[in-house]
Image (cartoon, helix red, strand yellow):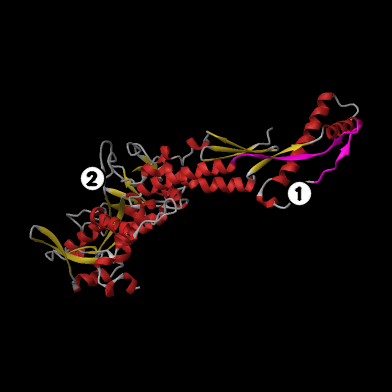
């Protein structure tokens, strides 16, 4: 029975043995794990239905659990949550506001307005919380589930949406509409705890019908930006960066494991032959009937025990300050015999440096995958941050090219409700963001440094 214990981190096998710690690269036993991105997050996992809680549904990932797996991945990453939070803040700006569109001089103009009747309806429910929740869901998965609540006036034949809620993607799935169908054919949605191995009763909701909004008191719809090659759920824009995100997540664990189990160099301990000869003679005296093989096994046990004792003294940060004690002696020929400990450089610093370079590439790939310029993500590359001008230009490009689609999708439920509840007003809602100018284009009294 082997006493070796191996821990695998990022394709490196760290093996504990009595003689020390060995790092063996080029192996990854996690490739068959359910958390391997190649097995859970890419491919045609929507083709066949999955049965959960006794009903057929469109699987959300190979394990029908992609949102939870993505959550676990991001929570271990030092960049992803911060970048997505910054992206949310840049998108949100000064928050949601009502507007009207007009065409002047062949340009579309957006005029921000106030409407007391509409604002009273908005204030009757937490519409700002909905906008934030929907933006978070969209930024993580390019889509979200919206729950529509109809008011009691529907009984009188008048459609009226009382409020809207952005649901957690971890709790929502689509009912399977049949083979060779797509999102347009989905008629029902399931809500429940899909992370449980023992599912309780699932709640089923009909799909919201925009042309007949008063048909159901409560309904759900899925709003998204279509992901190419996927017929139902949209997937995160950073899905291709998942292997790099995992690699970036691995480096802190590697360094922690090395720090706990070894120091930056190994040691070669020279034990005099006479020491072992004396041990062998004592074993013969203690076990006179033992065979040579049995004596050798006992000697090996003594060697292993000694090696383990010395290793505990010489390695690991918890043992800093300990020392090794030995006794010098002279053999029968008068030669001085002594123990000797020689340090052997293992180039752990080079190993860590190589892993750090890989991590830097991973960080860059991760940032690109999240769709935010490093200047806006507050990423420092090579110890150097971006200038104010670079940040302003990056922000202007972000506002001009990367916000409208997200805004259209997130506000689709609210703007649907505005058309249903207040027909003829031609009013919509979007996110208001102040224009950003360079400081030298702003009058001295209005500059940021004078307004903080």
Q: Where in the figure is residue 327, as x and y percent of width and height?
A: 85, 42
Q: Quadrant of residue 413?
A: bottom left
Query: Quadrant of the image for the C terminus?
Result: bottom left
Q: Using the image, tell me which numbered label, if any, was put on residue 323.
A: 1
Task: Determine which residue is flagged by label 2.
Answer: 184
Q: Using the image, tell me which numbered label, if any, was put on residue 355.
A: none
Mark-to-mark CA distance, 1 and 2: 73 Å
User: CB of mark 1 within 8 Å of CB of mark 2?
Assistant: no
**Which segment is the magenta one?**
325-347
Q: Residue at x 52, y 44 (%)?
A: 353
Horizontal side of residue 262 vs 360, given as left or right: right
Say whether residue 90 is magenta. no
Circle 2 Cα neighbour tier, 10 Å, few/some/many (<14 / 14–19 / ≥20): few
Q: Quadrant of residue 448?
A: bottom left
Horizontal side of residue 261 vs 30, given as left or right: right
Secondary element at image label 2: helix
Secondary element at image label 1: loop
- Determine if residue 405 is in view: yes
Q: Residue at x 29, y 40 (%)?
A: 230
Query: Quadrant of the image for the N terminus?
Result: top right
Q: Where in the figure is residue 80, as x and y percent of width and height?
A: 41, 52
Q: Quadrant of residue 309?
A: top right
Horizontal side of residue 75 vs 228, given as left or right: right
The image shows residue 26, relative to residue 356, as above or below, that is: above
Q: Mark 1 or mark 2, which has the lower sequence index?
A: 2
- Determine if residue 55 is in view: no
Circle 1 Cα neighbour tier, 10 Å, few/some/many (<14 / 14–19 / ≥20): few
Q: Where in the figure is residue 156, as x and y percent of width and height?
A: 17, 65
As rendered, which of 240 and 68 lies closer to the eye?
A: 240
Horizontal side of residue 306 vs 84, given as left or right: right
């Amino acid at each position: 029975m082997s006493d070796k214990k191996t821990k695998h981190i990022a394709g490196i096998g760290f093996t504990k043995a009595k003689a020390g710690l060995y790092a063996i690269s080029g192996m990854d036993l996690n490739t068959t794990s359910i958390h391997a991105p190649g097995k859970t997050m890419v491919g045609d996992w929507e083709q066949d239905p999955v049965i959960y809680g006794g009903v057929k549904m469109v699987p959300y990932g190979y394990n029908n659990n992609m949102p939870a797996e993505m959550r676990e991945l991001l929570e271990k990453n030092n960049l992803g949550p911060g970048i997505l939070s910054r992206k949310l803040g840049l998108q949100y700006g000064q928050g949601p506001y009502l507007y009207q569109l007009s065409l002047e001089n062949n340009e579309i103009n957006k005029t921000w307005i106030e409407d007391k009747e509409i604002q009273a309806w908005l204030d009757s429910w937490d519409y700002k919380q909905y906008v934030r929740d929907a933006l978070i869901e969209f930024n993580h998965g390019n889509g979200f589930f919206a729950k529509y609540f109809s008011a009691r006036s529907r009984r009188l034949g008048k459609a009226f949406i009382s409020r809207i809620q952005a649901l957690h993607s971890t709790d929502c799935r689509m009912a399977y509409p049949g083979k060779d169908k797509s999102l347009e054919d989905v008629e029902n949605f399931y809500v429940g705890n899909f992370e449980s191995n023992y599912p309780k009763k699932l709640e089923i909701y009909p799909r919201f019908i925009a042309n007949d909004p008063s048909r159901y008191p409560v309904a759900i719809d899925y709003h998204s930006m279509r992901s190419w090659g996927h017929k139902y759920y949209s997937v995160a824009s950073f899905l291709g960066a998942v292997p790099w995100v995992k690699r970036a997540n691995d480096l802190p664990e590697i360094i922690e494991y090395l720090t706990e189990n070894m120091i930056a160099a190994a040691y070669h301990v020279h034990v005099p032959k006479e020491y072992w000869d004396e041990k062998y003679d004592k074993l013969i005296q203690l076990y006179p009937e033992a065979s040579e093989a049995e004596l050798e096994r006992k000697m090996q046990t003594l060697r292993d025990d000694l090696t383990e004792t010395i290793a505990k003294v010489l390695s690991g940060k918890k043992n800093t300050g300990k020392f090794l004690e030995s006794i010098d002696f002279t053999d029968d020929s008068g030669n001085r015999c002594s123990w000797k400990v020689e340090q052997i450089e293992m180039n752990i610093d080079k190993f860590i440096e190589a892993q750090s370079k890989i991590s830097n590439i991973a960080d860059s790939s991760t940032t690109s995958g999240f769709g935010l310029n490093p200047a806006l993500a507050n990423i420092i590359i090579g110890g150097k941050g971006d200038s104010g001008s670079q940040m302003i230009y990056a922000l202007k490009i972000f506002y001009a090219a990367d916000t409208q689609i997200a805004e259209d999708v997130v506000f689709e439920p609210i703007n649907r409700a505005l058309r249903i509840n207040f027909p003829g007003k031609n009013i919509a809602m979007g996110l208001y963001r102040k224009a950003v100018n360079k400081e030298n284009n702003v009058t001295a009294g209005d500059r940021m440094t004078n307004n903080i």
